[in-house]
Image (cartoon, grey):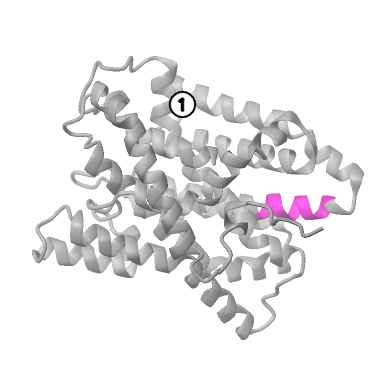
Amino acid sequence: GIAIIMVVMHHLFIPYTSTRSFHPGQIDSGGPFALFINNAQLGVKIFFVLSGFVLYLPYCTGRRTVASRADILGFYAHRAWRLLPLYYIVVLVTMSLHAANPVGSHAWYLEFAALLSTLFTFSAHGFLPPSNVVLWSVSVEIWFSALFPFFVLAVRRWPIAGVVIATTAACLVFSYIGKQIPIERVGQFAPFTSGLFATCKEFLFGMLVCHCYVAGLGDPALRARHACLLWPGFAFMLVAFYLIWRGAFFASAINYRALLFTVGFSMFLLGVISGASPMRWLLQTWPLQVVGCMCYSIYAWHGIMMNEMVPPETSLLADTMRLLLPYLAVTFALCALSYRYIEFGRERNSKPSFLIPERSDA
């Protein structure tokens, strides 16, 4: 829930706070609000860590296995049914009603094909689809899902910490190489700096958190030690934000600050799910959890809705504030329908999807 709020706020206010803002001077670029907005896209890293955790949990607990080809094909079918219907509906709506290029033009066909195939995240110039830029991370999620069974097999054969370290090292190497490849009008080779080659480590950190969490389920002492990681992890995330604000060394070579944030969030996540705390009680509030449940629909729809209702090129800060409540209300209503009837359309009872308890007959 917090992660999707961060991402939506980032896209709403980044036109006023970034170094290449559409409307410079309307928000103090050196202030704490601008610092938060400029780096609230770190919420995507939270999504990736949580995805790794959620995907690995049934395999870590033994409820599912990858012992046969049928197991792997079953995972692919289940994952495709979870991700692709909403993704393709958003793509069709985007390219029919919100296309950045004239419908039927050569550029339109190229973008449409790239979106349908999800291969655009391996393209230097198409990494951020101009008609709906937020879909880049959905494509990364889809491609990690394709690799996930092989990572499960890897952690069965080797210690999970070693797999995480090796994957992190490989991702940092790809990120470094990507930053050395200049791309005209883009800057860097985004598939290596922001795509699957750079983000696999976040999913693996989620798998590591899952492994530690499951290990602590039957060991109260270990679970108590895990719970102690909550506040150090939170401190790591704050330090990462501070280093980003200060523009610390090695910024152009290795994005170690984002890695520090990922490590901090992983510690925080393990801590908050391992023991009772005020932070855990806050995160268990019903509105925040429902927003979190709906995060895929919110993420998939909010970008094109924003460009229609609060276009960043022409809206001033006063316009954004005036349209904020209508935008949030309409977007939330659309996403609630999308969540209920696209993501979970097979479910006849909607109450569990919205975390509404069933009325007892007793």
In the visual, does 177 lie left or right of 60?
Answer: left
The amino acid beneath tag 1 is Ile
Using the rendered image of the protein, determine whether residue 254 is visible from the camera's viewpoint: no
Q: Nearer the viewer, residue 5 or 339?
A: 339
In magenta segment, residue 241: no
Indicate whether 243 appears above or below 151: above
Q: Along the line of sight, which residue is nearer the eye, 185 or 16? A: 16
Question: For this view, does 321 lie left or right of residue 244?
Answer: left
- Quarter of the figure with residue 197: bottom left
Q: Measured from the top left, where is residue 51 in percent x and y?
A: 57, 55
The magenta span reads 207-216
Residue drawn at x 67%, y 76% is 66
Q: Is residue 49 visible?
A: yes
Q: Quadrant of the N terminus?
A: top right
Q: Is residue 103 left or right of residue 69?
A: left
Q: Main secondary structure of the magenta part?
A: helix
Residue tagged 1: 244
Q: Position of residue 152 (x, y in %)?
A: 65, 67
Could you say which is closer to the camera, residue 60 or residue 257?
60
Residue drawn at 48 percent across, 71 percent down: 80
The image shows residue 61 at horizontal and vertical percentages of 77, 64
Residue under the image location 25 percent in, 57 percent down? 94
Q: In the rendered image, which quarter is residue 29 located in? A: top left
**Secondary element at tag 1:** helix
Q: Which of the 4 quarters of the picture holds residue 273?
A: top right
As for residue 209 lying within the magenta part, the answer is yes
